[in-house]
Amino acid sequence: MTAGHEPPDPTALALARTVRRLQDAAARVRAQARSRTVVDLATGILSERLGATTAEAAARLAGLAREAGVPVEVLAADIAGLAVAGPGPAGAPESTAARSDPVTPALAAVPDLQHAADTVLEQTGEALGAHAVVVWQRLPGGALALVACAGLPAAEAAAWSRVPPGVPTPVQRVVAGEDELWPDDPGTEGPSIGAGSARAVLPLLDGGRRRGAIEVLWPKPAPALGGPQRRQVRAIADLCVTLLPHSQPAAPPEDDTVFLEGLLTPALLLEPVFRDGQLADFTLLRTNARFRDPLGRPREALEGASLLETYPIACATGLFERLQRVHRTGDPLAAERVGLVFRTGALAVSATVLLAVAPLGGRLLVCWQTQPEQTGEAEQAGEAEQTALLHQAQRLARVAGFEEQPDNGRILWSEGLRELYGLPPDAAPVPLADLARHAHLDDEPAIRRLLDTVRNRHRTASAVVRLAQPDGSHRFTRVIVEPVLDDAGRLTAVRGAYHDVSAQHRTEVALGATRERLADSEQESAERERLALRLQQAILPAAPPPLGVTGLHAAVRYRPAAKRDRVGGDWYDVLPLPGKRVLLAVGDVAGHGVGAATGMVALRHALRGLAVTGASPGRLLEWANTVALREPGQVTATAVCVLLDPAGGELRWARAGHLPPIRVGADGAEVLPLPHGVLLGALEEAEYEEYTAHLAAGDVLLLYTDGLVERRDRPVEESVDQLIRDAGTPGPDLERYLDRLLELSPADTDDDTCLIAVQTE
């Protein structure tokens, strides 16, 4: 062999092949990423054009691809008007279409939520001092999606549009079950959007389920948020959860799908759903081709749905318990015959199922074979109980079902549907085609689109209509309709449900009114607060009435809130009664402003008027509770009521969720016991326990509101003990003693404070 033609080095060849293989793999990954982006874009386009949810649009895209016999990404590129480039030969340049593809992962913003986030930041940002609002939605599997963002750069929002479940952000921890996080909590540290900001993180709760979280960001240093500010943030969270969309569960891996289709028995693949760290439901990820829904629903209507919502009666009668046990223990369930009932609307099917369940990774594989039905008296009795249970659930949820068969004109209505229509019990069912005749005239276009989608496009659809009632009013009702198709794709029936959403509509109207009130001028708010302060100062006397006849000395103090917007409903009263007894009372009406001040006036004057009856403190609080329940605006308040008999030094007291009195004597201070008693205005039939004690000569009885001792960083009991120790003995000058208490007060909430001190001779 001549010089210059040496054989190639085997190691170099191996390295070259490795480099080539890695280049090919990288090209495939880039192509797959572009394909996924195009599929997401096409899903969004279908969702907007068809007026469907994201889950429905994704299912529709998959169905169209199957019908056309093309890959999903090819059909998606056609819908989006883009090209999807596949990996070419290693080292070859990508196609022009691939290089010019402008699609990038975009912020998954929801229009209603985005508008809400912008409005919240605009209207309340100045009041709270916040500079950004971010709304997150929890996706199946634990990932987070950013669905609304206001106040942050678009590039930063896009970079945080998806957060994998393994990233320990404060939002992930709250969604996983931790408590609310506020700017002064140490748990707000960690990687997150808006780095360097102080933040509050609150879960978005929907029926107890944590569907996401809201973040409110402030520039550092962290602000001190009091009770009203925190309640305002919680109200924002309650608004956002009503606008949060329902996400589509992630599809199972391809190998699970292939495995499922390879089984010879009907089977389902279930994904566990956790809420607050507990197994709460399963998602129907996939069914194989052999599985037939007992109620005849198509495969597309099942995949991605909640198991408890799809088969509620079957789950309640043993199915869910068995699945939960297998998931908890990891022990498979051998074939077991289980009698189940499947019901939707007026349609009910009983079946005996040969059930087998096995863990498959973190999921459950469920196989069942329908067995010949064997019914008897016990089975019939059980079905009757289940039917009664279903009727009760439908009545409470204001839901009624129906089914129509267009071929023979048969219509089935469940119990409660005639009531929604305002029809008598013996009235004939109304065909879906005549729905517009019973609805508000303005709802006719929505009803027409609903019928066209179901009958002509063979897709599930819904609409909110206003059903006319005999008294001329309208009932807001959500109508959900799905088609039932035979094997040839012909429409054989339509099924659906009516859901009375009038209460939800009223809530939305109230929220809209609240947002309008938030937009009122600062001048109006300031005038209301000045009015509340003047009202409170006019009602509360600067000094107690003369008590010389009773042998008592009394002193009172009222310290208003440091900030005008904190003017609240703290009040006190010292009232001599017949028989030389004295009524002592302090209270705190929830809230601030004119509403709290007027509530305070109502309760204070009610107690003064009722005390002359000679009733005991517990009875007086029962009557005051009735007054609070009847007041406009649902007044709630704490209070403590004391009847003192100076002749014997006996005192009898009762409390409604208030801090207990303190007795200060020669041998030190003592916090009196806490009799049982709930807040005024909380319960209709409330009872208030009474305790008695004795005051010796020279003893001082102290009554106060929580503005004197409340701190954010310690229990109230510790603050009370510290204050009494620091203040020392009262001495003969009660006025100076109360001034000393106010001066040494450890409170940091800037709230109103009321004090009463009474000393026996």
Image (tube, rainbow, N blue to C red):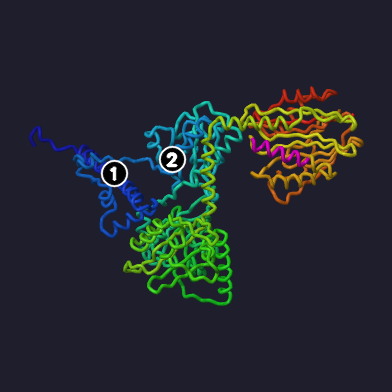
The residue carrying mark 2 is 115
> In the picture shown, does residue 292 fall above or below 628?
below
Q: Hey, what amino acid is under mark 2?
A: His
In the displayed orientation, state which residue is furthest to the right. Answer: 647
Query: In the picture, which quadrant includes the N terminus?
Result: top left
Left or right of residue 595: residue 698: right
Q: Amino acid at mark 1?
A: Arg
Residue 314 location, x and y as percent? 51, 65
The residue that appears at 75% across and 36% down in the rendered structure is: 586
Tell me, yes or no, whether the highlighted magenta stretch contains residue 597. Answer: yes
Q: Residue at x 61, y 35 (%)?
A: 227
Q: Position of residue 96 (x, y in %)?
A: 20, 41
For the C terminus, give its image quadrant: top right
Mark 2 or 1, which is nearer the eye?
A: 2
Q: Is 715 in front, or is 2? A: 715
Q: Please provide the residue range marked out in magenta.
A: 594-607
Q: Looking at the magenta stretch, what is its main secondary structure?
A: helix
- The disc at residue 34 is 1
Q: Residue 583: x percent and y percent?
A: 82, 37
Q: Relative to 337, is 535 above or below?
A: above
Mark 1 element type = helix
Where residue 230 sits, quadrant-wise, is top right
